[in-house]
Image: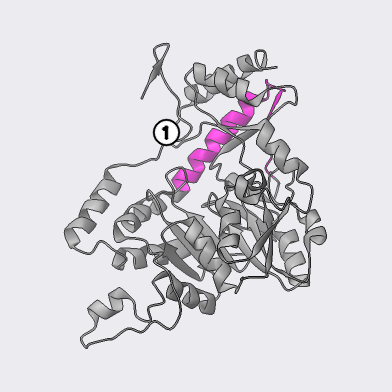
Amino acid sequence: MTETDGRKTIPIARPWIGEEEIEAVSRVLRSGWITQGPEVAKLEQEFALAIGADHACAVSNCTTALHLALLALEVGPGDEVITVSHSFIATANTVRMCGATPIFVDVEPATFNIDPERFEEALTDRTKAILCVHQMGMPCDLGAILRFSRRHSLGVIEDAACAIGSEVQVEERWERIGKPHGDLACFSFHPRKVVTAGEGGMITSSSGKLDDEIRLLRHQGMSISDAVRHESASVLVESYPVLGYNYRLTDIQAAVARVQLGRLPEIVEQRRRLGALYAAGLDRVPEVRAPHEADWARSNWQSYCVRLAGDLKQERVMQFLLDRGISTRRGIMCAHREDPYRSPPPRHTLTESERAQDRCILLPLYQEMSEGEIERVVDALAEAVGHSR
């Protein structure tokens, strides 16, 4: 870790890994079974229980999770999927990977999530599904999304890459994202996520049929899993009834994820405490707007995204903070501004999406971040305001 004026650099994120994860990896390595096997099966059971889902299927990352979820809903060539440009490019890419077309709609300025008010203008007779993103852990307006999808018989996939542990209020109770509330929800175990395994993903559903289809597709279309074949007392010969993929998670990764998942309540509680400290500190910096959390939503604060006043220059603020040993990232990207999606241009205006990318920055947030480090970031941000117009 580098030093700045005698102080350690504050990174944008840092995975929280301890001796328990290291021992879990050692245990799996000593077992001799390191590919998809018993640890993956246990992780799936524990994840479903933690989230409140009927089914959970582990895969190699959230991109492959989204791909399989779209295929399970039979999204293919000629179909259109309503989604956002304002997301990591993998969201749009997976739609293209199916041969379908992503139809970008704008986001809500308060939450940076998909705006259900824009669905009607995007709807055509080719629309097959809605792919909504719980951006940076902030839950989407699932009620409005589901009302529209049911009215038009559309599938709903939740890109919950950042949303492990986030919650929405349903009637009088709180439920975790990924129940799922749509047809399928897809999660990530990337190092910047709330629960990490280095890489990895999970797909949850309430449909046994969809879960069976995804399990078949993730392992080259193989009719019998490795675990069943190796544990059988008789010879089993697999078949390959469908075209599949190698989207498996390893037992090494699953072992790490199981340890992390066991600490999920502690992790979310700490991140929400850090988010509250940021919000309190930013009250004295009116030129920087803290993220908005609806009454019916509880974010896990996977990332802490702030919006700069219109006369502040994003890059100047980021450079000012970096010069003082504080790492940041620009606002979430817009896929339609990247070469693969420039032509044809989006059908609909994406003003808020572009504004969010240009005016927002992500501040450091990680499990072991201290109150003093939060104060240091806020103090530097307040100072940056006067130097970045």
The answer to whether 199 is drawn above or below residue 371 in the figure is below
Q: Nearer the viewer, residue 269 or 306?
A: 306
Q: Is residue 179 visible?
A: no
Left or right: residue 192 compared with residue 134:
left
Dividing the picture into quadrants, the one containing residue 77 is bottom right
Query: Would you say residue 197 sits in the magenta stretch?
Result: no
In the rendered image, which quarter contains the C terminus? top right
Q: Residue furthest top?
A: 5
Q: How is the image coloured?
A: one colour
- The residue that label 1 is drawn on is 368
Dividing the picture into quadrants, the one containing residue 306 is top right
In the rendered image, which quarter contains the N terminus? top left
**Amino acid at circle 1:** Glu
Q: Residue furthest bottom?
A: 234
Residue at the location (28% across, 63% down)?
35
Residue at the location (47% across, 49% down)?
265
Q: Picture coordinates of residue 142 (x, y %)?
A: 69, 59
Q: Nearer the viewer, residue 273 or 289?
A: 289
Query: Would you say residue 270 sits in the magenta stretch?
Result: yes
Residue at the location (32% across, 65% down)?
36
Q: Which residues are magenta?
A: 265-293
Q: Picture coordinates of residue 224 (x, y %)?
A: 34, 80
